[in-house]
Image (tube, rainbow, N blue to C red):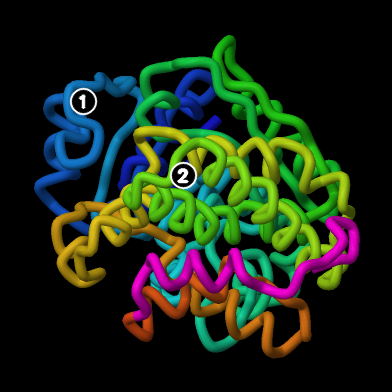
Amino acid sequence: MRGSVIGAGSFGTALANVLAVNCDEVRLWGREPSTVEAINTRHENDTYLKGIPLSERVRATTDLEEALAGSEMVVLATPSHATREVLARAKTFLPKSVPLVTVSKGIENGTLLTMTELLEDCLPEEFHPYVAVLSGPSFAKELARRMPTVVTIASHWDKVAQRCQKALQTDTFRSYTSTDVVGVQYGGALKNVIAIAAGMADGLGMGHNARAAIITRGLAEITRLAVRKGANPLTLSGLSGMGDLVLTCTGELSRNRHVGMELGKGRKLPDILAEMKEVAEGVKTAKSARDLSLKTGVELPICEQVYLIAYEGKNAKNAVVDLMTRQPKSELSGV
């Protein structure tokens, strides 16, 4: 079996290493020639996963046609804001009747499309039944080091999810299948925004009580919007909802939490992002979340404050005060 991974960032590279367990060859596409050379000569992505050895079955390339030729499973691991551009270049070479699995956790600015919706928007209808999404609590460094990781793979066609599940199953990587494509994606995308808020609370020194409140009320926000968009609420209590949310809000490896912590310390967003090698998806998703809130009428108080801090320069301490002094409500009132 030959697999393909489009995107040689930390998660794409880590997942290529997982896929290599069950594949004879995995082609990994990346933009940077230096990263590709390091993977092919030293079996290491020294830009994003320095010091972690990669399988010799993983071969990198900067050529999309070469990366996709003869593939029996394609993983799309580019940042959400770059997915449309890369897909436009890749679609001529995409193999037909094979799973197309997106692992990007974002909602496109402007269109407000999830990643599977974006794929369906960009690709001919014959590809649509094979689109799937992988999401769940999975830091790339731990995944690459073969530490136990469990995720969800969702597709409207259950057979596609099962094919992906079989291809990725190892003694340290386990997946569950789902047909709730909407719920899995809203959980994966919006948890990044909540993680920025949790990081801000930590940066402000607000303690464990505040973090627990943000996680819990954040899950309520995510669930409200996801259900409005057609999700099963039980999905949001699972791996791609609560599981991923807890990890991203508390884990030291969380990029979104890091952004929030630095904002809480009073630093400016452009300065924080300039120091980071990888994308913190929650920054752009905060704008999409706010637009979705306005469009659907679903209140997202925490996401709203993250948007105001990130895009309108609001003070983080003032945001906390505004959240704490909102009109008192019943916990189960829906807001």
- Whether residue 100 is situated above or below residue 291 in the rendered picture: above
Which residue does the image show at 30% across and 35% down from the upper left?
Answer: 59
Image side of residue 12 versus residue 303, left or right = left
In this figure, which residue is indicated by the disc labeled 1?
43
Across and down, in percent, residue 134 comes to: 63, 45
Across and down, in percent, residue 231 comes to: 85, 60
User: Residue 255 or 29: which is nearer the viewer?
Assistant: 255
- Whether residue 39 is situated above or below residue 218 in the rendered picture: above
Per the image, label 1 sits on a secondary structure element best described as loop
Dot label at residue 331: none
Taking the magenta stretch, the answer to whether it contains residue 326 is yes
Per the image, label 2 sits on a secondary structure element best described as strand
Taking the magenta stretch, the answer to whether it contains residue 308 is no
Label 1 CA crowd tier, 10 Å (few <14, some 14–19, many 20+): many
User: Residue 70 or 123: which is nearer the viewer?
Assistant: 123
Q: CA distance from mark 2 to mark 1?
A: 17 Å
Which residue does the image show at 49% across and 19% down from the upper left?
Answer: 21
Image side of residue 306 versus residue 171, left or right = left
Look at the image and tell me whether residue 6 can be seen: no
Label 2 CA crowd tier, 10 Å (few <14, some 14–19, many 20+): many
Nearest to the eye among marks 2 and 1: give it.
1
* Mark 2 residue type: Ser
Q: Which residues are magenta?
A: 314-335
Look at the image and tell me whether residue 303 can be seen: yes
In this figure, which residue is indicated by the disc labeled 2?
4
Name the quadrant containing residue 131.
bottom right
Which residue does the image show at 53% across and 64% down from the upper left?
Answer: 106
Across and down, in percent, residue 181 comes to: 77, 56
The residue furthest top is 171
